[in-house]
Image (spheres, rainbow, N blue to C red):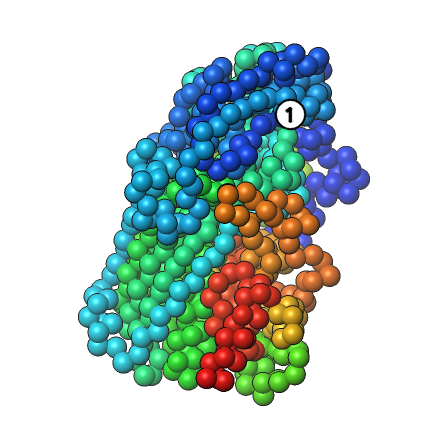
């Protein structure tokens, strides 16, 4: 019989809600320091070329300019901003400033001045002459091109194949094979806060200190050390309040540059990008071009699948290899397919750099496969839900590639629940409308992971102490990105220690004082790995507290009870001692402290699942699509804070709708980003949001804290293919290119008319 939980599973407001509402919380943009200077970057206006000459004399002569930086007076150490731990071997091809630009937005120079306006004026005075080189914008062209090399080692970053069974034989013998080609676009993370950081020399200890809205402080420290050629102990990285990231601040981009300014000048410096600079010069989601062939028998059982994906990494290596491999791994963890091959190829292009973006390859690979799954069901004459039910993985299935076991996989539960709530059968089978406005329904499934187990080091150290006044402090390298990480960890510790979460202090990551964490906030690991670490650390503290309390109360360990911040001997319940008093008694009598430092190593990486159902309405005159209803069901194990979970899903749906319909970094034939502001880059706004009904399947997960696993990334994955499938259902067309813009929809409708007319 499960014990009733006191804090876990309840709503507790986010820890900094009051300060945010009152405008009291400081973001980096709000921070000021005495003598602080301001930096401004000069970004390349061309997509590919060599700098023939660069004249900074006019900029240097402008009053208020302190120094101008180029490749000539900055370190030329190579690094890779995707590297997050020392043992990770990656190609290093980035520098602070370059003499060969590889995309529009590459860093050419910077001005550091007494104020921001002077820096902006000085940037306009820098004169650069480029020898332009031919450009490669299309990943397929990059794959074939041999004469235009973006980097000396060629345009192909890597090729990876993952295979199980005998795909060729199964394909040859299959009665039905359905093939689709699906492409996905580069997108911007669209965080409210543009990229920014501030650096200074700490007058107390001489450390080069970086304040940054980042996802991994130890990665920031590592990359700055590599770029500047400094020891790790010379650098301190402090995580600040984040105004949104979604993976966009998962790599140190500005931090090495700004840190060098301070290291060179010895004074505080702030470097901030505007929206256009953030869109063009930071990171994007990887664009992909994919082909998938699915072989089935006439009863609807999947016999084999062959997937081939080309991944656009942009101008530098960053995570091109990692995201390509991640896509492949996820392709094997959703359906029970005995014969399957995945081939992924990543290439450079003269376009903005790709990097981590919410879902880390999952949105792209599931757009490809889930659109194809619907088309396969259509070919069979089966309901798309019934087809999926025949083939989805079941709880505790093995990963056929030898990866981590899937755990308590409840995707079928999600599908059945969503089908019921959405009223799928009646909506899917209703007669098709023939007027201007037509409706359709679509759905899609998706999977993601819960950490890095069996792929990269996945561990975290935490220090927990019960204080003399009966409260607690947990030190760990935690990064709250606005999703409630701090409160979630508090709830877990509070549940173990039976202490009000308000009495637990959980500071965020700071490399000087926080214990080491191998990976930070990425790979959907925070609740499953960091939460489990907090639970185990709290259990060890409680074990120590219990032992010493029994010594003080002169009773057996089994006689100790905890109740609302008090400890008592169950044989003498009137003699209650507060946590604080007991700590002081233990310190005085036993010369012990109630504290524990513990390193937790993740023991598993269970899959998480989501199923989305979407109803869409299309204006056949204009091609505009309106999403009018969504049901999102997620296999989460256990919701530590259900309101936070629903908030994650609601925001993820907004991102996914944009991915499906409106968001795209548009690049012209010169490599210029045309959609470099929010008047041209179209995110989904509040009036366009449909009603989103969120349902959770809480069946528990063995190694998760109180059974919890991840939801933050998977929640944005199935919605885009669900919408595309809904459009195709409504119009009886086959859109396979994201985003499904009005132009693409009208072209598909015209093509359909021509085919019928022919």
Determine the residue located farthest toward the bottom in the rendered image: 431
Q: Position of residue 365 (x, y in %)?
A: 42, 58
In depth, the one of 477 and 582 nearer the eye is: 477
Where is residue 170, by image quadrant?
A: bottom left
Residue at the image point whose x is 58% and y is 42% from the top: 279
The answer, for residue 516, to whether it is visible in the render is: no
Q: Position of residue 411 (x, y in %)?
A: 45, 67
Residue at the image point whose x is 62% and y is 70% from the top: 623
- Taking 552 as reference, is 84 left or right? left
The answer, for residue 342, to whether it is visible in the render is: yes
Residue at the image point whose x is 31% and y is 75% from the top: 177
Say which residue label 1 marks: 124
Q: Position of residue 567 (x, y in %)?
A: 61, 41
Where is residue 198, by image quadrant?
A: top right
User: What is the number of callouts on the image?
Assistant: 1
In depth, the one of 585 and 428 nearer the eye is: 428
Q: Position of residue 309 (x, y in %)?
A: 36, 56
**How many residues crowd around disc 1 within 10 Å: few (fewer than 14), some, or many (20 or more)?**
few
Q: Is residue 561 above or below residue 634?
A: above
Residue at the image point whose x is 52% and y is 80% from the top: 753
Q: Is residue 1 above or below residue 255?
A: below
In depth, the one of 252 and 293 nearer the eye is: 293
- Taking 671 as reference, is 199 left or right? right
Q: Is residue 635 above or below residue 430?
A: above
Q: Secondary structure at mark 1?
A: loop
């Amino acid at each position: 019989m499960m014990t009733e939980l006191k804090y876990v599973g309840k709503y507790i407001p986010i820890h900094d809600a009051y300060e945010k509402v009152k405008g009291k919380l400081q973001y980096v943009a709000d921070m000021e320091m005495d003598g602080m200077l301001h930096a401004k970057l000069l970004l390349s206006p061309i997509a590919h070329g060599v700098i023939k000459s660069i004249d900074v004399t006019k900029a240097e002569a402008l009053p208020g300019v302190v120094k101008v930086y180029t490749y000539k007076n900055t370190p030329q150490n190579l690094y890779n901003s995707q590297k997050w731990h020392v043992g990770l071997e990656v190609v290093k091809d980035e520098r602070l400033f370059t003499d060969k630009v590889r995309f529009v937005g590459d860093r050419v120079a910077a001005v550091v001045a007494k104020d921001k306006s002077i820096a902006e004026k000085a940037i306009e005075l820098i004169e650069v002459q480029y020898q332009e080189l031919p450009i490669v914008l299309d990943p397929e062209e990059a794959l074939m091109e041999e004469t235009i090399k973006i980097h000396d080692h060629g345009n192909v970053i890597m090729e990876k194949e993952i295979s199980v069974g005998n795909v060729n034989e199964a394909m040859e013998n299959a009665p039905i094979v359905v093939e689709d080609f699906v492409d996905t676009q580069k997108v911007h993370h669209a965080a409210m806060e543009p990229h920014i950081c501030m650096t200074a020399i700490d007058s107390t200890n001489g450390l080069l200190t970086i304040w940054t809205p980042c996802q991994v402080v130890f990665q920031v420290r590592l990359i700055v050390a590599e770029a500047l050629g400094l020891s790790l102990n010379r650098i301190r990285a402090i995580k600040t309040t984040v105004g949104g990231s979604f993976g966009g601040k998962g790599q140190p981009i500005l931090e090495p540059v700004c840190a060098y300014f301070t290291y060179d000048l010895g004074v505080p410096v702030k470097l901030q990008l505007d929206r256009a600079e953030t869109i063009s010069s930071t990171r994007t989601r990887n664009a992909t071009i994919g082909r998938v062939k699915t072989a089935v028998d006439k009863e609807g059982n999947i016999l084999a699948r062959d997937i081939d994906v080309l991944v656009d990494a942009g101008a530098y290596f960053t995570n091109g290899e990692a995201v390509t491999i991640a896509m492949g791994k996820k392709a094997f963890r959703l359906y029970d397919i005995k014969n399957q091959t995945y081939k992924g190829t990543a290439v450079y292009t003269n376009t903005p750099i790709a990097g981590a973006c919410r879902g880390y390859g999952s949105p792209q690979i599931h757009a490809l496969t889930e659109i194809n799954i619907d088309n396969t069901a259509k070919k069979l004459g089966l309901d798309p839900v019934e087809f999926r039910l025949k083939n989805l993985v079941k709880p505790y299935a093995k990963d056929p590639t030898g990866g981590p076991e899937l755990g308590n996989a409840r995707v079928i539960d999600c599908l059945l629940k969503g089908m019921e709530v959405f009223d799928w059968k009646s909506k899917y089978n209703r007669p098709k409308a023939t007027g201007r406005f037509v409706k359709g329904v679509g759905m899609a499934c998706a999977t993601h992971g819960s950490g890095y187990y069996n792929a990269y080091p996945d561990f975290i150290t935490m220090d927990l102490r019960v204080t003399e006044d009966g409260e607690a402090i947990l030190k760990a390298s935690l990064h709250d990105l606005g999703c409630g990480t701090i409160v979630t960890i508090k709830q877990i510790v509070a549940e173990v220690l039976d202490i009000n979460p308000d009495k637990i202090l959980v500071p965020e990551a700071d490399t000087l004082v926080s214990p080491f964490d191998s990976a930070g906030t990425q790979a959907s690991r925070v609740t499953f790995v960091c939460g489990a670490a907090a639970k185990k650390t709290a259990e060890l503290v409680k074990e120590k507290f219990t032992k010493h309390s029994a010594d003080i109360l002169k009773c057996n360990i089994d006689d100790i009870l905890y109740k609302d911040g008090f400890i008592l001997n169950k044989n003498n319940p009137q003699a209650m001692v507060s946590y604080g008093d007991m700590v002081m008694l233990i310190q005085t009598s036993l010369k012990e402290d109630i504290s524990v430092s513990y390193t937790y190593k993740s023991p598993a990486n269970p899959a998480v699942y989501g199923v989305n159902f979407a109803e869409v309405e299309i204006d056949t005159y204009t091609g505009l699509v309106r999403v009018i209803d969504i049901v999102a069901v997620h296999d989460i194990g256990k919701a530590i804070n259900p309101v936070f979970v629903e908030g994650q899903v609601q925001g993820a749906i907004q991102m996914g709708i944009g991915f499906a319909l409106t968001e795209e970094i548009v690049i012209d034939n010169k490599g210029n980003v045309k959609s470099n502001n929010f008047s041209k880059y179209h995110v989904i706004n509040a009036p366009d949001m449909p009603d989103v009904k969120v349902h959770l399947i809480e069946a528990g997960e063995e190694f998760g804290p109180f059974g919890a696993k991840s939801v933050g990334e998977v929640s944005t994955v199935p919605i885009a293919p669900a919408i595309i499938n809904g459009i195709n259902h409504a119009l009886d067309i086959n859109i396979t290119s994201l985003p499904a813009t009005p132009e693409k929809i009208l072209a598909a409708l015209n093509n359909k008319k021509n085919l019928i007319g022919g």
